[in-house]
Image (cartoon, helix red, strand yellow):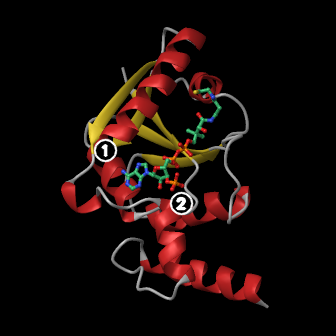
Amino acid sequence: MAVSAIYPGSFDPITRGHLDILQRFQKVFDKVYVAVGNSTKKKYLFDFEERARLVKQVTAKLENIEVISFDGLTVDCAKQVNAKFILRGVRTAGDFEYEQRMASMNYRLDPSIDTILVYSKPEFNIISSSLIKEVAIMGGDINQFVPEVVAEELTRKLAEIKK
Ligand code: COA
């Protein structure tokens, strides 16, 4: 039986850190759905469609990966695609507590869906979408943190906002 999982996130924008996590899980599951979702706590730079489009662009050549969008609960999204696992990456102790709270809530909402965490590689520990946006706003080089197309889109978006 094929085993599927979802890798949910805001991806505002997707980073090399997210891609590393995705590629490592890709080796374990028959299919991984990258699920672009919304957090009620976040104000996004890229809208829902833009975030999903960028994720599609940077994962286009990866096998067993499908990009989907959802606007409700993560567990409902998982159920819709028949995925039994939610995948997340952990960079720091701060992430761990946040992930633990999310995993516990998701478990209470649907005990049939398990969360699996993997540690981020050390070179990606310092990356976060907000920090990358901050560096880009201040004119710093973000190419080492995000794929080329994302860096271009981010530069274009910030120039558009500045106008
Ligand atoms: N490398 C680099 N950065 C990483 C990373 C990695 N491996 N893993 C996480 N991050 C960063 C992201 O860049 C992001 O940074 P930012 O906060 O500066 O923007 C941050 O860690 C986490 O963002 P992300 O992984 O995109 O997810 P999220 O915390 O925004 O969560 C959802 C988004 C959609 C998964 C979550 O809001 C959700 O589950 N929503 C649905 C509602 C729901 O089901 N609620 C109940 C469950 S608690």
Which residue matches tag 2?
55
Q: Is residue 116 above or below residue 158?
A: above
Other-residue count near label 1 (Cα within 10 Å), few / some / many at <14 / 14–19 / ≥20? few
Q: Which residue in the rendered view is the most extreme toward the right?
A: 163
Query: Residue 76's x, y, as percent?
Result: 65, 23
Secondary structure under badge 2? helix
Secondary structure under badge 1? loop
Residue drawn at x 48%, y 17% as measured from the top left: 104
Image quarter for residue 59? bottom left
Other-residue count near label 2 (Cα within 10 Å), few / some / many at <14 / 14–19 / ≥20? many
Q: Quadrant location of the N terminus?
A: top left
Residue drawn at x 37%, y 61% as measured from the top left: 127
Q: Is residue 123 left or right of residue 13?
A: left
Which residue matches tag 1?
92
Query: Residue 85's x, y, as percent?
Result: 43, 25
* Of the image marks 1 and 2, the number of the one nearer the N terminus: 2
Query: Residue 81's x, y, as percent?
Result: 58, 29
Q: CA distance from mark 1 to mark 2?
A: 24 Å
Query: Residue 145's x, y, as percent?
Result: 37, 71
Query: Along the line of sight, which residue is nearer the eye, 82 or 161?
Result: 161
Q: Which kind of residue does numbered mark 1 sit on?
A: Thr
Q: Is residue 41 left or right of residue 94?
A: right
Q: Is residue 155 left or right of residue 4?
A: right
Q: Is residue 49 above or below residue 27?
A: below
Residue drawn at x 29%, y 59% as measured from the top left: 124
Count numbered badges in the picture: 2
Image quarter for residue 93? top left
Q: Quadrant location of the C terminus?
A: bottom right
Residue drawn at x 44%, y 86% as measured from the top left: 140
The label number, if any, that marks residue 34 in the structure image: none
Q: Which kind of residue does numbered mark 2 sit on?
A: Val
